[in-house]
Amino acid sequence: MKRVYSLFLVVLAFKAWAQPDEKENLGQIELSVTDRYKAQVMEAQKVLERPTYQDSIEQKIAVQYAIFSSPIEVRMQPETLSPARIAKIEVPELYRAFIRTGYGLYNTALAEAYYNSGRSAKSSFGISARHLSSQDGVEGLYYDDNSFSRNHLGAFFNRYYRKLTWHTEAAVNLDKFSYYGNPITGAFSNEDSTRGSAPYNWYRSYAVKSSIKEANKKALGWLQGLSLGFSHFDDNYRSAEQDFQLETDWALPADDKNLYLELNAMYFQNQMDSLYAGFQDSSAFKQSTFQFQARPHIHMERNNLGFDFGLNLFILDQKDSRPDFSDGRVFFFPELIVRWKMIPGVLSIKGGIKGELSRNNFRELSQLSPFIAPGQLTRAGGENRIFAGMEGILASNLSFNLEGGYQIFQNRAFVYANPSFDRSLDQVLYVGLRYHDINILYAKGALDFNWNEKLRIKTSAIARSFQSNESGARAWYIPYFEANLSAYYNLKDKIGFQLGLDYIGSRFASNTAFPNYDALLKPYLDLGLKIDYRYNSRIGAFVNFSNLLNSQYDILLGYRAQSVGVMFGLNYRF
């Protein structure tokens, strides 16, 4: 009995020791399962209509655990790599100067010289000079001297700072062109009737421009770049132009994107030694134009789609010597371009609408045609272009580009064979200028083949259709169709062959056919070939052939192109 009582006390003491305090942790619990659990469903009895819920566990049990890694032995012995041989690579020699001279038929002379500074992290500069002239080479002219001369002298300077780059450039251009467009016809077909030098004109241009651009993003804050330029342009007939230009580029923050803004101001003044009809004054005729441009635009990229949204705004104010004359206008041009990478890296599709304004100042008009009559009025013109196209690759070395569109021109400048100029032998054959509105529907395409950088072939073509609401107005001197084929072949890095073939379709020169002239110029082909020989890295030679087919065609009505031409020369680097 005592043993039973003692055993009962021991069990009771163990049971009392095993019950933890409510505020203490349970510690370790050993649980032994002696039989399967047998579930029983008891009768449910509702105690309260709305029972209250109360968590009976006031403190969560703290669980402590640890994970011990057990490394696995990997039996792998990689082969040792031989140490790389570090070779000394010399920086290739940078030639600072290039000289090229040539001479050809028709007393044609060529001279070019370029010099640039060496490598520097602080500054760089360079100068350039070019001369090209020819004395004759056009058969059947009334004048036996139809010489031209083109001369250029330029220089630039760059200064590199930590936040910005300062660039300054200056150029002088002196170009002479003869008004030789008077072929021998009729009674003057005898060679003895030819005269000396044709009337000519010199175009003189002096320009300087300085700009500042940020070297790193946001280095200049919202300003990305600023440039200021001035140019003076005049000729032998006392026509002159002063042109000032201020251009700025801005990037305005807009959340995670930027709103890009171009703000430009331009002012140019023309002075001509001619009077407007009805203006009773002995002074030269003057014309001044002020132009302000604001172009806000944004660029977005999402997946394979790209968008350009913008607006081109121009404010124009024009005045001249006519009493009480003033012309102020505002031009709005939308800008919306969509690009879709249909097959990235292979095929892309683009389309949209874009517009711009042409100033048509004296310098730009002389580049349109050097034979233009002096003293032309300038009129700003606008263009809206709606287009769609695609570009991509057809093979690893063959790419293509296709585009079609519709151009809407307002006050487009055209050179024109003016009937008011008498085509007799005693008159200078100037080319006139006309402005009118015209629409052009076009389709163009191009192919580019490149084989191991040794053979490269490019071909392109464009077809146009013209529409105009003005009576008798045409797109003068713009061909209905033109095509180009160029090929370059590099033979063992010693000899380079470059072939160029141009086809120019029919063009209208004027509305009225002059005696012995056709106002619709016929199509023509022009074939050229250039051969370059490289003796070594410093010395080389070249031979250029022009108009190899000896095509008899007019650049402008009466202004015939030269016959077959050959020029050879040398070039040297040091």
Image (cartoon, rainbow, N blue to C red):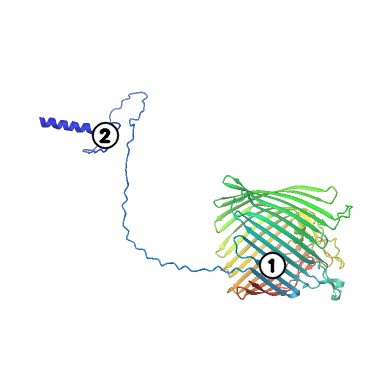
The residue carrying pointer 1 sits among few (fewer than 14), some (14 to 19) or many (20 or more) residues within 10 Å by Cα, namely: some
Which mark is drawn over residue 502?
1
Coordinates of residue 146 in the picture (x, y in percent): 80, 70
| Label located before the other in sequence (2 or 1) | 2
Is residue 3 in view? yes
Residue that label 2 marks: 39
User: Amino acid under label 1?
Assistant: Asp
The residue sitting at 80% across, 62% down in the picture is 235
Say left or right for 280 vs 26. Answer: right
Instruction: Please tell me how many numbered marks the rendered image carries.
Output: 2
Is residue 474 in view? no
The residue sitting at 12% across, 31% down in the picture is 4
User: Amino acid under label 2?
Assistant: Ala
Say left or right for 183 vs 71. Answer: right
Helix, strand or loop at mark 1:
strand
Coordinates of residue 169 in the picture (x, y in percent): 69, 60
Quadrant (top left/top right/bottom left/bottom right) for the C terminus: bottom right
Helix, strand or loop at mark 2:
loop
Coordinates of residue 25 in the picture (x, y in percent): 29, 35
Q: CA distance from mark 2 to mark 1?
A: 100 Å
Along the line of sight, the residue nearer the viewer: 478 or 276: 276
The residue sitting at 76% across, 74% down in the picture is 107
Coordinates of residue 42 in the picture (x, y in percent): 28, 29
Along the line of sight, the residue nearer the viewer: 123 or 415: 123
